[in-house]
Image (cartoon, rainbow, N blue to C red):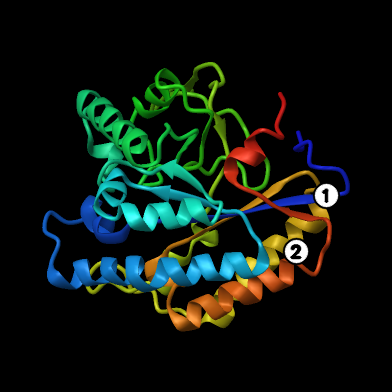
Amino acid sequence: MPLNLPEGKRLAVNIGVDFDAQCAPNGDTSKLSPAFLSRGDFDVEVGAPRLLALFGKYQIPTTWCTPGHTLITFPDSIRSVLDHGHEIAAHGAYHESVPSLTEREERRLMELQLSQHEKIVGQRPRGYRSPAWDFSDSTLGILEEFGFAWDSSLMGRDFIPYRPRPVVVHREEPHEFGPPSSVLELPVSWYMDDVPALDHVPGMLAGLMSTEGVFARWRDTFDYAYENEPGGVVTLTVHGLVSGRAHAIMMLERFIRHTRQHDDVWFATLSEIHDRWSD
């Protein structure tokens, strides 16, 4: 089922910024070394301002999926994002590994991050993106319980939003599927994320791929959707500590220019895209 896009628009595009700052590796390591913290410094002091300038140049509204830790540690940066007209969405409390949490702890951290959003942003977020791009068995129900309109963490489609279902997994019998959720899924993909291809963390992530190859992947994904999935959405995920680097932001701008060659492409926040969906 396609989105009900604004008149004259064929395809929606969202650029989502995961504003992890100094808590990015929390789901993967128990200790944040000075090197990890310096990457967060770059995100806040260099990467995020460069992205804001780029989006301002092309007048593109974006969604910044932001951990509560970033909100309370760098409130001036959050105000800058809001002053530039962008959306703030939830992205965990401290970039925790959601699948490893107990239900009790996951609910506690959800309450914590929502209180931080209310304090710093002034309101609760409408949407959520898991720091791990994965759920526990409890996550979907917790999102419903706390009234989220949308999620952007799962990969059950590529260009069309959908209603995720809880699944009971069996090895030797068919899986059991629950009812579709009230939460709308705006799907993501590792193929359309800058970190796996471009980042580098010694001993954890090789990355360091050529921007030519990454650009070709992003371009081809967009071109396919434009030709074959009218009424769909292309969801791109970037990080200031990666796409704020000189070579990567040049590639991101190149991608923006490519998409803007089509005057029937609609750049929007994830909440704006959610509001164009009807079951």
- SS label for mark 1: loop
The image shows residue 139, relative to residue 134, as above or below, that is above
Q: Name the residue under label 1.
A: 9
Residue placed at 81% from the left, 47% from the top?
A: 230
Q: Residues within 10 Å of mark 2 (few under 14, many from 20)?
A: some
* Camera sees residue 62: yes
The image shows residue 253, relative to residue 72, as above or below, that is below
The residue closer to the viewer here, 98 or 79, is 79
Query: Can you tell which quarter of the image residue 101 is in?
Result: top left
Please state which amino acid type lies under the numbered disc 1: Lys
Residue contact at pointers 2 and 1, CB within 8 angstroms: no
* Quadrant where the N terminus is found in the figure: top right
* Quadrant where the C terminus is found in the figure: top right
Residue placed at 54% from the left, 51% from the top?
A: 86
Q: Mark 2 points at which residue?
A: 223
The residue closer to the viewer here, 114 or 97, is 114
Q: Position of residue 166 (x, y in %)?
A: 46, 23
Mark 2 or mark 1, earlier in chain: 1
* Camera sees residue 196: no
The residue closer to the viewer here, 199 or 84, is 84
- SS label for mark 2: helix
Q: Which residue lies furthest to the right in this view?
A: 8
Residue placed at 21% from the left, 68% from the top?
A: 36
- Side (left or right) of 83 relative to 270: left
Q: Where is residue 50 in the image (x, y as percent from the top left)?
A: 47, 72
